[in-house]
């Protein structure tokens, strides 16, 4: 009887293991046969669940829906292309059907060309509620011939005011460019065409809040923000240039699906399925640090950590820590 139970347990464990990477599955099965532990069986079960929920490859059609302005915006082709429109009737926006906790979110975006002053194209992750978390890309339009401003921000437990702003080293309106948010238990990195432009590190152990306990959906929108977007609101939107159109391609969420509080542990497990927990993603490489310094030295135009007047010298606590 003990032999039969043991054989049944091994077969059941093997069934779960087959959902994992083949090489890793063999290694785990060898360990399992040696140890024969029910605790290990449960650990592998959690491992399997995490693996099955960790990767989401989808396009706009399958993974997102319009939350406003659908009457004049559209998902095109095979669902891989998106067109957001702003005119005098309405802006438009889209959001993911699922929420995520950790991973990599990316889109190709071609921003509004010409006179885009007063417009904002937003691309961000956010949870909901007064204590929400949020990670932002916002592209602030400008008059014809003047460069866009890339506005980044992060909210943790409802607290924002962590802005950094940049100019770009190319015209973002003539071609598609990749904008990626990489988010793991160690740090958040904003990338433009694979070049890191900002890092927010996890100093939670030192009392600085970090977004690691709330699933966040993916949002993008195009809207009228001429009360602040261009030169602090001095330049208003020119409706004779409407409609304003932002084009998107290839939405990819290589991320852990949020399935409630259990995901707080599952999505942070240092296992192969959770590739974002690999040591290689805990710190920028030497080359990436050089790229980030180049961006900060040449294209950063605002940093909350140097705005002593705005904060009356009461700077955000992470400003006194290594930034990357």
Image (cartoon, rainbow, N blue to C red):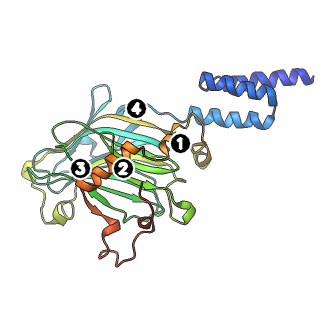
Q: Which residue is mark 3?
A: 91
Q: Check if mark 4's residue and mark 3's residue have beta carbons within 8 Å.
A: no
Q: Residues within 10 Å of mark 4 (few under 14, many from 20)?
A: few
> Quadrant location of residue 316?
bottom left
| Label 3: element kind | loop
- Under circle 2, the secondary element is strand
Under circle 4, the secondary element is: helix
Q: What is the count of numbered marks?
A: 4
Point out the tag, 2 or 4, that comes first from the N-terminus: 4
- Mark 2 or mark 1: which comes first in sequence? 2
Comparing marks 3 and 2, which lies closer to the viewer?
2
Distance Cα–Cα, label 2 vs label 1: 25 Å
Residue placed under numbered mark 1 in the picture: 279
Which image quadrant for residue 134?
bottom left
- Residue 196 picture location, percent across and down: 34, 46
* Label located before the other in sequence (4 or 3): 4
**Is residue 40 toward the left or the right of residue 52 in the image?**
right
Mark 4 lies on residue? 62
Distance CA(mark 4)–CA(mark 3): 22 Å
**Residue 197, can we see it?**
yes
Label ID, residue 221? none
Cα–Cα gap, marks 3 and 1: 41 Å
């Amino acid at each position: 009887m003990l032999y039969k139970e043991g054989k049944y347990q091994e077969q059941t464990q093997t069934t779960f293991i087959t959902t994992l990477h083949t090489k890793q599955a063999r290694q785990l099965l060898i360990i399992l046969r040696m140890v024969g532990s029910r605790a290990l069986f449960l650990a592998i079960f959690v491992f399997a669940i995490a693996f099955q929920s960790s990767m989401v490859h989808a396009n706009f059609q399958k993974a997102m829906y319009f939350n406003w302005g659908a009457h004049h915006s559209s998902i095109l082709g095979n669902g891989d292309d998106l067109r957001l429109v702003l005119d005098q009737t309405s802006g438009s926006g889209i959001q993911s059907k699922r929420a995520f906790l950790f991973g990599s979110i990316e889109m190709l975006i071609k921003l509004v060309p010409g006179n885009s002053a007063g417009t904002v194209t937003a691309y961000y992750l956010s949870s909901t509620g007064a204590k929400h978390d949020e990670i932002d890309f916002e592209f602030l339009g400008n008059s014809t011939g003047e460069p866009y401003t890339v506005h980044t921000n992060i909210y943790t437990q409802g607290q924002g005011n962590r802005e950094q702003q940049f100019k770009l080293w190319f015209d973002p309106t003539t071609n598609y460019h990749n904008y990626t948010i990489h988010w793991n238990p160690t740090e958040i990195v904003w990338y433009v065409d694979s070049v890191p432009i900002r890092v927010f590190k996890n100093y939670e152990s030192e009392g600085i809040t970090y977004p690691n306990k709330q699933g966040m959906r993916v949002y993008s929108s195009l809207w009228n923000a001429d009360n602040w977007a261009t030169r602090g609101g001095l330049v208003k939107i020119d409706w004779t240039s409407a409609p304003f159109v932002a084009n998107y391609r290839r939405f990819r969420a290589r991320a852990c699906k949020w399935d409630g509080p259990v995901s707080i542990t599952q999505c942070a497990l240092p296992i192969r399925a959770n590739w974002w927990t690999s040591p290689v993603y805990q710190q920028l490489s030497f080359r990436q640090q050089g790229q980030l310094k180049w961006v900060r030295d040449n294209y950063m135009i605002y940093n909350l950590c140097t705005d002593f007047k705005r904060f009356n010298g009461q700077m955000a606590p992470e400003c006194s820590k290594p930034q990357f």
